Image (cartoon, rainbow, N blue to C red):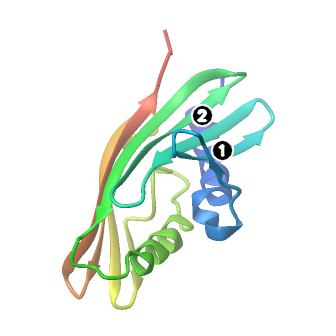
Amino acid sequence: MITNSQLCEFLVKAKKATYAAGDLAKKIVNDDKSTTLEFEEGSLKYHDNYFGGEPYGGREVVFVDGKPFYIMTYYGQVDASVTNPGNIYGVLINALKLIPKDFPFRGPQKYEQSPFVYKNTYTGKVDSFYGEETISDKGVVVYSARYAGGLVDQR
């Protein structure tokens, strides 16, 4: 198996190469209308599958030698008052590019892209965690998402 440190390192690479890569990421639209993003390195495979739009939800799985090892589920949305959700998702992508190496769940604890402020709070380590991210516009929350995950199939 791999260590938690190796998993964190892989997650950073995988996430930067997929959703955080924006339009450069290779997206597969599935028959069920979900979107899949994948990244592989050696015996490790990252698989991100989500539904949406607005709101959106999905899950990320890391496989080691074809066996599930890690999962994270997530659900979020832009507030209905926002007329251009694309602006908010642009901020989100920029925040996700700054994924912390020790806590590779979403973005950093704080990122500012005026007038927006991204915040990410979480509890736990890569083996078991949960958290929430928000984006505020001049102090008003216009986006929020929750996520949870950790190691799976360990016994």
**Image mark for residue 62:** 2
Residue 122 showing in the rendered view: no
Residue at horizontal 44%, vertical 65%?
108
Residue at horizontal 42%, vertical 54%?
52
Dot 1: what SS? helix
At which x and y percent is residue 63?
63, 28
Looking at the rendering, which quadrant does residue 114 occupy?
Answer: bottom left
- Quarter that holds the N terminus: top right
Q: How many other residues sit within 10 Å of disc 1, few (<14), some (14-19) or many (≥20)?
A: many
Q: Is residue 88 left or right of residue 24?
A: left
- At label 1, which amino acid type do we have? Phe
At which x and y percent is residue 56?
38, 53
Residue 8 showing in the rendered view: yes
Looking at the rendering, which quadrant does residue 39 occupy?
Answer: top right
- The residue most toward the top is 155
- The residue most toward the right is 42
Residue at horizontal 39%, vertical 76%?
88
At which x and y percent is residue 19?
58, 59
In the picture of the structure, the residue carrying the numbered disc 1 is 10
